[in-house]
Amino acid sequence: MDYNAMELMICLAARALEDGSTVVVGTGAPCAAAMLAQKTHAPNLMILFEAGGVGPILPTMPISVGDSRTFHKAIMASSMPDVMEACQRGMIDYCFLGGAQIDKYGNINSTVIGDFHKPKVRFPGSGGANDLASLCWRTMVITPHDPRRFVEKVDFITTPGYLTGKGAREAAGLPPGTGPYKIITNLCVMGFDDETKRMMVESIHPGVSQEDVVKNTGFELLWAKKVATSEPPTEEELRILREEVDPMRYIIGRQAA
Amino acid sequence: MAETLEAGLGVEDIGTGKLFMDPDPDKAREFFRGKSRALTDKVMSVKEAVSRFVQDGDYVAIGGFGTNRIPTAVLHEILRQGKKNLGLSGHTATHDFQIMAAGGVINRVDVAYVVGLEARGLSKAARRLFEEARIEVCEWTNAALAWRYKAAAMGIPFMPARIMFGTDTARYSAAKVIACPFTGKKLLALPALYPDVAIIHVHRADKYGNAQIDGISVSDLDVARAAKKVILTTERIVSEDVIRGDPTRTAIPYFCVDAVCEVRYGSYPGNMPYEYFSDEDHLKEWLAVDSNPETLEPFLEKYIYGTKDFQEYLELCGGEHRMEELRRLEFLEDGLGAS
């Protein structure tokens, strides 16, 4: 069955979400992944939005993480501090982030390219990303895979990954047991090596070679002992994604890279 | 005393950013001591509210969430009145930041999220402010600013939190690291943020400023309590009986509020929950024209400087007919194609 890279990324992200867990999502692919998970293996997945939407039944893709859709038929129309405090208490299992640059420890830049005081490019900044990555148990990233994004050193650490390696988060003062979990790209799925906390390729998508991944990564990757081939979307997943989650093709109609 | 505390807590100065606002709770108490508690009629025009309560140099906090429940009419009026050197709390400031940047009215910003309009793209006019180094910047996060408001609302000088550690976001903030006196754990101390003026759009308020918000409140309960002056715009002014008939729903009490302005469709082109959806076409036009000063200037002239009030702007944007379309989108009356 034909599918595009965006559809595959959304399916892979959806499968990583456990039933009965909680996830803070943004707009776009993460939101589609959470909706797909709810409609497949994780009907009891609870979705939150950082502006205050808690447990909505999403009628369509939100445009903003604070728009009306984010609390449509929700359990609660709450507030930013309430959602962030739930994260800080340890109640939120997953969050999804993106960014302009990411390094081998999963540190993310969404602030500036170039000098901070006179940047070449100014991006929005942390928003809630630093908060969510500091406080949620598992941070997930869905991102296009290219050497401009996957860099040896990010220009600015907006959001903490594993910082400089094992134990660095805890030493810096972040809550123990948190950190990046899966990095899902248009080429592969990566996790993090237990010993070094460096990014490690776990599966490569069908039709993608190891060389493709290396060529598109600006740092040295670790490879799992047995690198799998990513499981393509099932017919059922694609049907739900196309007919129920994103019928207007706002997300799945986009280029993945 | 301060030294003993500092020594005891082991303060670490990690932030190199500038603290724009004084977190001293006693100075704030002195201000609030002098603030009127009178139950008086505060209804006025947007023009009068901006002229009386927004001074050049003031530090401004904006309610809502960027393109959702934003006080657009007041922001336009700030531009029309040519206010200068304002500070801004960039707590997910998207279209609101875009307006302030386009008008050149701000010279310093606490950044959590600015420049972008979420998935819609980046505002070039807003980017230029940073890339040409025309604005003073201090970095924070959404939770950091939310909790800075909360500390101010509580009347305490800082809020401890467990975010930002190990990052450049912290390095370019004005936060400090302290040790918890009970557990010894590292905590980030976020200084209380008492804005000079908060501008918040609500669903309904009475003439005294008792206000109700439908849907998510974002950080506005704390923003309204933290700010020294509060300008409310409201979709509707209601009688005091409406407030007293259901006091559970009062989000902001009158004694926080200085001005009440009735502005129907006041969040346009933003979304107002249970009222109207965002006008994505108009927001796209904004992003297109603000890429270049040559196209931005006539656009601002047409929609803001050349209009006498927000009503004229709404008329230029399609008036009641367009608002009715946005109401239909909000209530998903034409299916799910809501964009």
Image (cartoon, coloured by chain):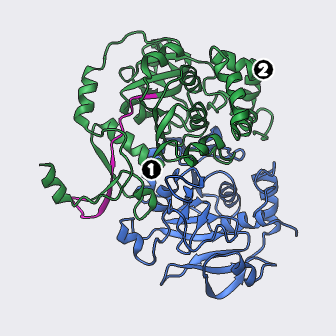
Chain colours: A blue, B green
Query: Seen in the image, is B325 located left or right of residue B156?
Result: right
How many numbered marks are there?
A: 2
| Residue B315, position as x, y percentages in the image | 73, 17
Q: Which mark is residue A64?
A: none
**Residue located 48% across and 22% down the image:** B232
Label 2 or label 1, whichever comes before in sequence order? 1
**Residue located 69% across and 45% down the image:** B120
| Residue A243, position as x, y percentages in the image | 82, 53
| Residue A167, position as x, y percentages in the image | 40, 76
The chain letter under disc 2 is B
The chain letter under disc 1 is B
Residue B34 part of the magenta segment: no
Q: How many residues crowd around disc 2 within 10 Å: few (fewer than 14), some, or many (20 or more)?
A: few
| Element type where label 2 sits in the image | helix
Amino acid under disc 2: His
Disc 1 target residue: B140
Camera-side residue of B227 and B222: B227
Q: How many residues crowd around disc 1 within 10 Å: few (fewer than 14), some, or many (20 or more)?
A: many
**Residue located 75% across and 64% down the image:** A257
**Could you tell me if residue A73 is visible in this image?**
no
Residue B181 part of the magenta segment: yes
Magenta residues, start to end: B180-198
Amino acid under disc 1: Trp
Q: Report the quarter where the C terminus of chain B lies.
A: top right
| Element type where label 1 sits in the image | loop
Query: Seen in the image, is B187 located left or right of residue B217?
Result: left
Query: Seen in the image, is A219 located left or right of residue B295?
Result: left
Disc 2 target residue: B321
Determine contact: label 2, label 1, CB under 8 Å: no
| Residue B146, position as x, y percentages in the image | 43, 43
